[in-house]
Image (cartoon, grey):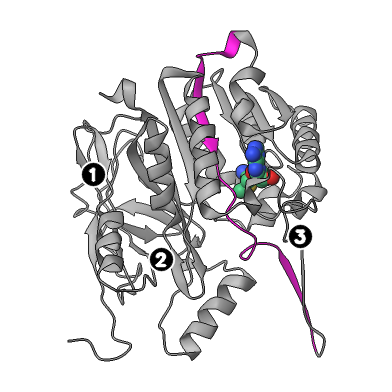
Amino acid sequence: MLRPGGLLVTVTKNTRRGGRLVDLAAATRRLATDTGFAYLQHVVALHVAIRDGRLIRGRRSGSCTTSAAPTRPDGVCTWSLTKTSSSSASQSPPEAQLMGEPIPLSVWPTAQQTSRGQRAGRYTPASIAHPAKMLPAIARQAITAYTDPGDVVVDPMCGIGTTLVEAVHLQRRAVGVEYEPRWAALARANLRLAAAQGAAGTGAVHTGDGGRLPGLLPADLQGRVALVLTSPPYGTSVHGHVTATPNHGVTKRNDRYTSRPQADGNLAHASDDRLLDAFTSILATARRVLRADAVVAITTRPWRRRGVLVDFPAAVVAAAERAGLVLVERNVALLAGLRGDRLVPRASFFQLTHVRNARTRGTPLRVIAHEDVLVFRSAQEQT
Ligand SMILES: C[S@@+](CC[C@H](N)C(=O)[O-])C[C@H]1O[C@@H](n2cnc3c(N)ncnc32)[C@H](O)[C@@H]1O
């Protein structure tokens, strides 16, 4: 029935079954790709209104639950996704009816400031060179949501230490592992800066493979980890910084995790399959150090390869399940700011170029303005 270039748009919701989150979006995507469709876009339709630069729960977001959520946020609003949807977040649900205590939402306003603004004065200036840092506000939100002061937070692929720095500012005990000595050194420098600024938690960084985490944790922290918060590497094409000079084109820099040969152990250079296998074993070993009610939170987003969207979040869910974890929650960390009743885009050069090129070719792509925060618990504890 479709004309050439015609689009299939599907709308789905994540649902809970027996304490698990069923990833219907991924199932729908698999069905569509198996029947010959190319995956183009993943749009989040918010079930919250934006008012005065804030997210307000709408009256009709009735899918918020309190009892079914097994993790710390007491209320979790489901969210929908569409592919190449023409709906937009500005179609807000009815006015908010929020009284008393704020209700935790699955949409996190994590880009109220730019990435640079969030780091200014809090991280060493050299940290900017890392090609794929987590937004500090995402780390803060996850640590606050899933742990208490004094709890142990680990990141087995800690980069320049965003998880660790935010954890120590929130009075947690933080341990990280990073493969690249350069980023590990910066993570240590960032922890020293945090301590100098009065951060009350403690932090340590080990250089090496993330799969060695259990052997690197001090004896008194074994089995006491409350939160693993991490983001896996995902290739180099979408990273880095760009300088555009009139008549001289564009110069790309800070777009590599490492200058070592590609055959080394940095998973950023691995094939998708090897990256996911190695990530699975890093998660499986991390599971050994978790306390019973611990949470594993993984920030990730889809990326484009030759115009087609790679459903990396679904691959991460599959990897985590192979590692003995169960998906219990899926949050949306906004990469766009909230101003008044609108979303303010903070798209990178790469995203804008991809989207502009696609639109010129007649494919109505949109700039991705969110990151998935996938939340898991150990399968043992969940059953
Ligand atoms: C997406 S980045 C994490 C960035 C970090 N969240 C931050 O804000 O700085 C992924 C990191 O994993 C590191 N990495 C790659 N392979 C690794 C391995 N086998 N063990 C530990 N870290 C690894 C990369 O060098 C990179 O710094």
> In the orientation shown, which residue stands out farthest toward the top?
220
Q: Label for residue 293? A: none
Q: Residue at image x 45%, y 32%?
A: 296
Magenta residues, start to end: 220-246
- In this rendering, the label closer to the viewer, 2 or 1: 1
Q: Nearer the viewer, mark 2 or mark 3?
A: 3
In this rendering, the answer to whether 344 lies above or below 381 is: below
Q: Is residue 153 above or below residue 16?
A: above
- The quadrant of the image that shows the N terminus is bottom left
The residue at 79%/50% (across/down) is: 260
Q: Could you say which quadrant of the image residue 193 lies in? A: top right
- 241 within the magenta span: yes
Relative depth, front residue between 212 and 255: 212
Residue 195 vs residue 59, the one in the foreground: 195
The type of residue carrying mark 1 is Cys
Mark carried by residue 341: 2
Amino acid type assigned to the residue bearing label 2 in the image: Asp
Graded by Cα atoms within 10 Å as few (under 14), some (14 to 19) or many (20 or more), the crowding at tag 2 reads some
Can you give x and y, in whole percent of width and height, for residue 247 in the image?
Answer: 81, 90
Q: Is residue 351 left or right of residue 343?
A: right
Q: Where 350 falls versus 76 (above or below)?
A: below
User: Circle 3 sits on which residue?
Assistant: 254
User: Badges 2 and 1: C-beta atoms under 8 Å apart?
Assistant: no
Q: In this figure, which residue is indicated by the disc labeled 1?
A: 64
Whether disc 3's CB lies below 8 Å from ligand 1 is answered no
Q: Tell me which image quadrant ligand 1 sits in.
A: top right
Give how far across and how far down residue 339 sits, in percent: 49, 64
